[in-house]
Amino acid sequence: MTSPVIPTIRPARPEDVPAVVAMVHELAEYERAPEQCHLTTEQLTSALFAAAPALFGHVAVDEHDEPFGFALWFLNFSTWAGVHGIHLEDLYVRPAARGTGAGRLLLAALADICVRRGYQRLEWWMIDWNPAAGFYASIGAEQMSEWLPYRLSGDALRELADHATTAGTRTGD
């Protein structure tokens, strides 16, 4: 981006997918884990544009309708509140476009969806050293220090799944 950009935020379209995949890989590089990112254009197209998608996306585009930022998100559900919310999986704005307001506008678009649909939460995870912490605090986001993330993957995930199989558990799939 060589000139000031006034971002436009819109839902992702199939033709945006290659740019979004490229930015996901840029994000993985930024987060010092490029070897862990395996997303392909085919995978993201399938996830976003399936008959009943479980993943949604918005893009920040320039005056030529070229994406330079994105938000990928999905619905969660609070059993205590009894309503859905949005979990923001990834938010990224290319370095040359930072400072244009695109990040704030992408989050505002998701906040608007929450408010219009009666959702009570917009949540995300952030790597602990990310300098965006100050930005998130400036918009009123609160760090959830009392809740700790857990992840089951790889061999541990397969071992637990094997336990379901040997116990005769039916998943309905």
Image: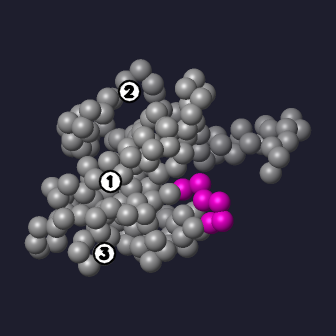
Residue in the picture at 38% in, 27% down = 144
Residue at the left extreme?
Answer: 3
Residue in the picture at 49% in, 64% down = 38
Secondary structure, mark 1, is helix
Question: In the figure, residue 33 lies in which quadrant?
Answer: bottom left
Between circles 1 and 2, the one closer to the viewer is 1
**What amino acid does circle 2 point to?**
Met
Query: How would you rate the neighbour count of disc 2 (Cα within 10 Å): few for under 14, some for 14-19, many for 20 or more?
Result: few
**Could you tell me if residue 26 is visible in this image?**
no
Between circles 3 and 2, the one closer to the viewer is 3
- From the image, tell me which residue sits under label 1: 106
- From the image, tell me which residue sits under label 2: 144
Q: Which residues are magenta?
A: 50-55
The stretch drawn in magenta includes residue 98: no
Label 1, label 3: how far apart the Cα atoms are? 15 Å
**What amino acid does circle 1 point to?**
Leu
